[in-house]
Amino acid sequence: MIPIRRALVSVSDKSGVADLGRALHALGVELVSTGGSAQALRDAGVPVREISELTGFPEIMDGRVKTLHPKVHGALLGRRGVDDAVMREHDIAPIDLLVVNLYPFARVVAQPDCGWDEAIENIDIGGPAMLRAAAKNQERVAVATDPADYADLIEVLRREGGSTPALRRRLAAAAFAHVARYDGMIADWLSARVDGDEQSHAFAPTLHLAFTRSHELRYGENPHQNAALYVPGRPPAGSIAGARVLAGKALSYNNVADADAALECVKAFGKAPACVIVKHGNPCGVALADDPPHAYELAYACDPVSAFGGIIAFNRTLDAATVQAILARQFVEVLVAPEFEPAALAALAGKPNVRALAVGSWPETLTPSRELRSVGGGVLVQDGDRDTLLLSDLKVVTRRMPDAAQLRDLLFAWHVAMFVKSNAIVYARDGATIGIGAGQTSRVVSAQIAALKAGQADLQVAGSVMASDAFFPFRDGIDAAAQAGVVAVIQPGGSMRDSEVIAAADEHGLAMVFTGIRHFRH
């Protein structure tokens, strides 16, 4: 245990620093600080010494040089029983606790009007140097970078009378991770700009990933595989990574993956109450309705067999009536919604195997992030898929025009197809799926499976519409759809045999529209 007699505080993120300063002062700790941090402590009524008083040297170059001094780094790096004499000789007083977080480089460069010079000025030099020094000398020095650690730090100091080896090791590891993440962001930003060019390249020459373990999962894809969920800082609202588990047992790898697929699909439908049921990464039922219970009824009707043990997501607060209807009808692994009414959670109290994930609300305009996928020996990176298709973007290529109701269903089916594994075929009518063919090596087989699923669920394909995530290379997919009773088709177009496919649609009296964009999902 190392008593804390002197602490150096220099933080960019001043969250919680006033409370930390008061607590340290109450424990008899002398506080030394810099610039804005010193002012924040004074404003909180905490006595504090300026760093220049400690070093005997003023802050210079607009604050660029203030902590790069032997009386700071010697105070952090000095070893007990090894460097005591040299510290006395040079009048270096040991610093037992360092509280530092770094300039907000990521936030600054994320601003659309951020220029090169502003970005460079937000590269911290003294902060990383101090963090590395303190973390290296963890045998004697405690270091805190995250305001979330302040309460635990103070609790240990009060209970133990100083910092413990376990606390110092944990905080030192967090400090090195903080610096590594920071340096990685800077390296990626700079490497994307050649010769000072302020226009970034789409993909930088280097990629540094910094994720923090959120929690370990029950198991991986299979019970003999271990797994954990990692997140980049604070996950945004409306995401599975940032979800609050309100009920049920721990999640598995597959639970998280399927819940993410269900949530991302249901987010595509904006303000209309929607329900999405996912099984093994694929939607097996999607519907829009006037309220969540009705949306669930329609989504479940699409494929009751596959819905068993599935993941169900809503884009509205989940109420008790909907939860009770689900529990009375099927076994469900996970329920996902922005929020849950208290009565809905009460209805789940007797079902410990059903997880309830509250993800919070999400913005109406969704900005897709980069997607990463590991491959043998490397990582694939791409822009996230998105769709901004409007009715005005559709190109009618057949003699027959779809009517207004069919156009609405075509767009609905198109949005569902975005989240179905390729080759994807979706049959829909009146804002609900009635058959989904997913993950086949043949598009015509996917069309046949979609019709088969509709038949098994006793749903009428006649009069429905069909969406395909990619073009039809041959007319056989259109022939199969017409035979099943489809009346309108939406697809990207762009096949060498588009003319044959269009002719087939005209032969069958189908309406068909081209989108000019495809949505493969491998």
Image (tube, rainbow, N blue to C red):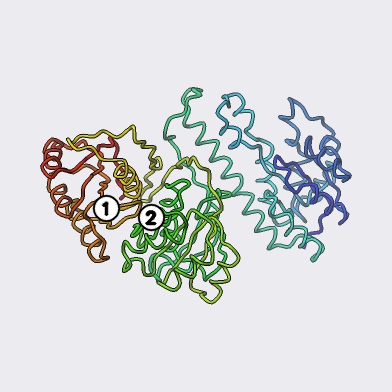
Residue at screen point 78% across, 30% down: 59
Give the quarter of the image for residue 470. Answer: top left
Residue 149: image location, x then y, percent: 69, 55
38 sits to left or right of 422: right
Residue type at mark 1 is Tyr
Residue 288: image location, x then y, percent: 40, 53
Residue 358: image location, x then y, percent: 55, 59
Say few, some or many: other residues with alpha carbon within 10 Å of mark 2 (under 14 / 14 to 19 / 20 or more).
many
Residue at screen point 37% across, 45% down: 380
Give above or below for 141 relative to 59.
Answer: below
Residue type at mark 2 is Ala
Of mark 2 and mark 1, the one earlier in the sequence is: 2
Say few, some or many: other residues with alpha carbon within 10 Å of mark 1 (under 14 / 14 to 19 / 20 or more).
many
Residue 469: image location, x then y, percent: 27, 46
Instruction: Pick the residue in front: 31 or 90.
Output: 31
Residue at screen point 83% across, 34% down: 52
Q: Secondary structure at mark 1?
A: strand
Residue of label 1 = 427
Q: Secondary structure at mark 2?
A: strand
Q: Which labelled disc corresponds to residue 287?
A: 2
Instruction: Pick the residue in front: 514 or 14.
Output: 514
Instruction: Pick the residue in front: 38 or 296.
Output: 296
Give above or below for 43 relative to 355.
Answer: above
56 sits to left or right of 233: right
